[in-house]
Structure formats: C-alpha cells, structure tokens
Image (spheres, rainbow, N blue to C red):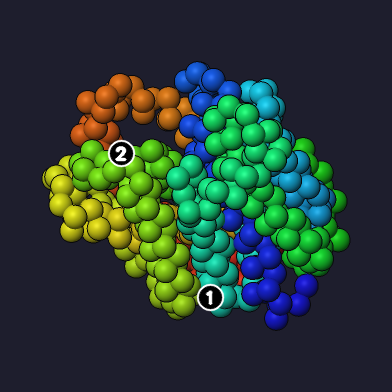
Amino acid sequence: MAKTGSLKSTIAVSLNNYLDAGAIVAGASGVTLWQNYLGLSEMHLGWLNALSANALGAAIGAIIGGFLADKFGRKFIFTYNLLVYMLGVLIVMLAVNFPMLLIGFMITGISVGIGVPASWTYISESSEVNNRGRNICISQMSWGIGPMVILLFGMLFAPGGYLYAPVQSLAHAIVGIDAAQAAVEVFSSRVVFFTLFIVAFIAWNLQRQLEESAEFTANKAKDKSGIVDNIKLLFTNKVAVKTVAFLAAIYLTWNLVASVMGFFMPHIYETAGGLNNETANMLSCISWVFVVVTTFIVSFFVDKVAHRFFYIFGLAAALTAWLLIIGGGVSTIGGIWLFTILWGVNNGSSVQIFYALWGSELFPAKFRAGAQGLMFFIVRGLSALWGLVFTFIYGENGEGFTMAAYCMIALLLTSLVIGLIGMPNTRGKSLDQITRERYGDNY
C-alpha cells in the first residue's frame, strides 16, 4: 500500500486495540450484574477471567494469529477475524446461562489475541520510517480510549446511571415487565457489549478494504517457507531467541503490574482514599484520560527523541505512583489525584508502546507476526497465572496490600533495568535496514 496512507490505515487497524481493551473492561464492569443474574460462584468468575481477552483466550489467539498472519498475510486476519469477534460479543449479549457467557468470553478473547500481532505488524510495515513510533502511539491511544469510553458507558447504563431508564425499558420490552430485577439490570452489560459490536462492525468494514502489507507481499514473492519452517527458524536463530527473551521480559514484568491495576485502582481509592464506589470508578475513568493525553503528546516526539527518555519517564511515573501507596500518600485528595495522574502518565508513555514498536521492528518479515504472537502468548498466559498467585499475596481482606505493592515496585524496576540494558537503536531506520543489521542479507 502507498506510504501516504499510513495514518488512515493506522487508525483503521488501531480500532483493534479499542476492541481489545474494551472487551476486558466491558467484562470486568458488568461481571457483578452477570453474577447476580446467573447466580455465579467465584469459581465461575475465575473461569470467565481465565478464558477472556485479559488472559488465556487472548494468549491462545495470539500464537495462532501471529503465524497465520505470516503465512496468509496481514489482510487475511483483517478480513475474517473481526467476524469472530462479533460472534463472541453477540453470544455474550444474548447469554442466558453460564456456558453461553463463557463461550462468548472465550471466542471474543481468542479473536482479540489473533488480531494483536497482525495489527502491530501491519502498522509498522505500512508506516514511513519517521512515523513508525507515532503510528504505534496512535494504536496505544486507541488502547486507552477503549477503557475510558467503556467505563463511561458502564456508569451511564448501570442501575442508577443517567441512561439506565431506556435500558430498563428495553429490558422490560424483551423479558417482560414482571422479570426479576437481576434479569433487568444485566441489560446494562448487554448494551455495553452492543457498543463493542457496533465498533467491531465499523472496524471490519474499514480493515477489509486495506491493501496487503507491501513488505509481506515482497517477502512472500521470494520466500515460500511454511508455518512450521518459520516456527523452527524463530526457535533456532540465536538473534531471534535473544530478542524474544528481551521483549518478553520487559513486557511481562510491566504487564504483571498493569494486569492487576484494574482490581487495585478502585481498591486504593476506596480503602486508602476513603472514596465511595461511584467516585472510585469515575477516577479510574479519568486515569484513562491521562493515558490518552500523554500518549498523544508522546506521539509528536517519539520519532525525534531518544526512546530511552520516554521509557525511563513512563516507568519513573509508575514507580512514583506505587511509592505513594506504600508511603500513605493517597490518604488525601491531593495524593489521590497525584496517583491517578502518575498511573495515567505511565500508561501513556508505557513499556507497551516500546514492546509494540520494537516487537514489530526487531524480527524479519517472514516470522515478524509469529514472534509477536509467541511473546503475547507468554505474557498473557503468565499474567493469568499471576492473577492466581496475586490473590494469595493480597489476602482475603487485603492484609497483604503492602507486600503486594513491594512486588509491583520490584517488577517495575526489573522492567526498567532490563529495558535500559537491552534497548535497541532503531529510530530513523527502515525495517529492511534493521533486519539486515541484525540477521544479515538472507532474511
């Protein structure tokens, strides 16, 4: 495709990040409503989380989608994958029992995983050399807008929210005026998932019109290797193996912290800050506003300023936020706002930006998406296991809160140190130049 169209194609493909983060937040924000409606146990909720877009569902999808994108093309994924996503969301919307809800969560999660490596790969391959970082930042902004919008919808459509009346009327029209209260209230979550269905339909129509990545087309013309060949190559090439280890390490240590923040943030606001649930959710939403604003600012400079600066900047904000927690700094309204801003700044200049950027730069085209799928599988899979370990550290009533905070700081410091040691110098270089420097002329 023409390089002049990189911004337009980036926006179209970045909607996948909106749908990824949106699916996670939509599931989390409505889980209590589904629990009340279907009488779910904590074990049921554990399965929903484990197979969702937040954990194993996405992990399984990523390792499949990455190698499929390298074999059949990035456009192949864009043409069909969001149809799978819409099917999953539709099943959730219509769910009347736990198996339906679980299947819907699982299908949606797998689709999210399938789309991630193809999306970041396509964005890098279709970008101009001096706009690659900017375009990845646009993708990251979409990842921030998703939770922000879905949290807002969740508050508006929730029982007692400003837009609950039409939701209630819709529920009564479908399930009857005498339906149980829980059956009516769960329509708030059904409507939130319907908004994801609409965005997925729009994204699918935009993405299936995209041209195939020129880099993928050029590579396939000279390289006829299959999926198994590429997997073998990925695991036997020393440079590739070291790169996987480096990127997986920085992303995993950061993501283990980020993956529990959906749980931690409201708890911090409600316990340490003494806020009610509604205010806590509002501040969680505001935090995502800072994510979007920070990423927007970073996007103007990431291709012009050393990556090291923004990498340190984001992690310094994250570490300061957690030090505030340990020091009791969130016991005042000023401290709460500072924590909200710092965590938003961290996500806006996050390790995920550089993981997405370097992950799409540091591998040759023949297994570029496959390598990202493998790393995403490792990170999301281990994050799911970490969720179980974390509950033991945290305790039944939060008695391990301080210990958990120290764990978060240790993980963030690890991500910072490994990142600074192994950080590549790719700014201003073409993908072809980076590949030749790292792998020689045979790739």
Q: Distance between the residues labelled 1 and 2?
A: 43 Å
As helix, strand or loop, the secondary structure at mark 1 comes to loop
| Residue 162: image location, x then y, percent | 48, 54
| Residue 195: image location, x then y, percent | 64, 52
Nearest the camera: 193 or 352? 193
Which quadrant is the C terminus positioned in? bottom right
Q: In which quarter of the image is residue 422?
A: bottom left
Nearest the camera: 89 or 174? 174
Q: Which residue is drawn at 34% across and 53% down?
A: 283
Q: Residue at x 59, y 43 (%)?
A: 168
Vertical position of residue 417 compared to residue 394: above or below: below
Q: Residues within 10 Å of mark 2 (few under 14, many from 20)?
A: some
- Return the residue at label 2: 267
Which quadrant is the N terminus positioned in? bottom right
Q: What residue type is labelled 2?
A: His
As helix, strand or loop, the secondary structure at mark 2 comes to helix
Q: In which quarter of the image is residue 389?
A: top left
**Closer to the camera: disc 1 or disc 2?**
2
Residue 140 visible in image: no
